[in-house]
Amino acid sequence: MQAFHYQAPASVADARAAAAAGAKLMAGGQSLLPSMRLGMSQPEALADLSCLPGMAGITVSGGVVRVGAMTTHAQVAASAEVQTAIPALADLASRIGDRQVRNRGTLGGSVANADPAACYPAALVGLGATVHTDRRDIAADNFFTGLYQTALAEDEVITAVSFPVPDKAGWQKFKQPASRFSIVGVFVSKGPQGVRVAVTGAGACVFRAKELEARLSGQWSAAALEGASVASTGLNSDLHGSAEYRAALIPVLAARAVG
């Protein structure tokens, strides 16, 4: 790993200033540090967000679950509030990576990294969440813009994510056994924003399966997805599965998520 300058900003303003000066923001480091070891990322400076006050924690109020950006996956999974309000979100968090990743990785870090096979993007889009930053609020539908790309500015800091509490929700993923990333993952919900079906692992970034949403809007049941199909055009194809294989998995996992 190359040499770098380590910084521990004491405030969001300090973190923003460090990023503006060229430092790479680091949350849990579970994606960034491995990429640095492999030489895929070579920042000259790191700004560690773990010391920032008030960036972790979970609150439930007014039909919304608000999760601080530095809240770990393990904390989301173990939260009684999340388990009661959105059990599918707690379930998703409990199946991310391994124990080390869940105890070090954070919601904000995962969302900002926007890995095409990460689980959290499906929860954000599948629940119609809102990403809060130090300067604005961004709807999840507008946040993920491409392969490892988001709507964030270089010096913008995620502070929290708000999830509307749905009437029903479910999560299913077909995982790559070594990394536990999603070959395909599907998050479904029915709530204030209607029916939403979000897919991760299958494309360059998370996307909504509108044809499945239409079926579930008419009837919220696994039976409504019988015979459903998703086009393979533009989907990922690699050693773990072809585009056609991933396309075939999407309605199957959606049906299981509906239950």
Image (cartoon, rainbow, N blue to C red):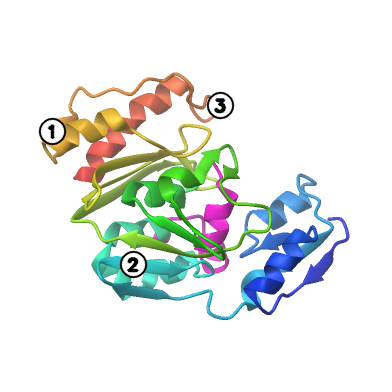
Residue 138 part of the magenta segment: no
Q: Closer to the camera, 34 or 133?
A: 133
Start and end of the magenta stretch?
94-116
> Which residue is disc 3 drawn over?
238
What's the residue at 46%, 22% (across, down)? 243
Give the CA distance from mark 1 to mark 3: 30 Å
Q: Mark 2, mark 1: which one is toward the viewer?
A: 2
Examine the rendering and report whether any part of residue 117 can be seen. Answer: no
- The image shows residue 204, relative to residue 26, as above or below, that is above
> Disc number at residue 107?
none
Residue 52 spot, x, y in % from top left:
62, 77
Q: In this view, does 248 lie to the left or right of 145?
A: left
Residue 99 part of the magenta segment: yes
Residue 259 spot, x, y in % from top left:
18, 45
What's the residue at 11%, 37% (across, down)? 219
Residue 163 spot, x, y in % from top left:
35, 60
Q: Which of marks 1 and 3 is nearer the N terminus?
A: 1
| Mark 2 secondary-structure assignment | strand
Asked where in the image residue 162 lies, by quadrant, the reply is: bottom left
> Disc number at residue 65?
2
Asked where in the image residue 13 lies, by quadrant, the reply is: bottom right
Q: What residue type is labelled 3?
A: Asp
Q: Which amino acid does label 1 sit on?
A: Ala
Which residue of the protein is positioned furthest toward the front in this rendering? 135
> Which residue is disc 1 drawn over?
223
Decide: few, some or many residues near mark 3? Use Cα within 10 Å; few <14, some 14-19, many ≥20. few
Q: Which of marks 2 and 3 is nearer the N terminus?
A: 2
| Mark 1 secondary-structure assignment | helix
Decide: few, some or many residues near mark 1? Use Cα within 10 Å; few <14, some 14-19, many ≥20. some
- The image shows residue 108, relative to residue 206, as above or below, that is below
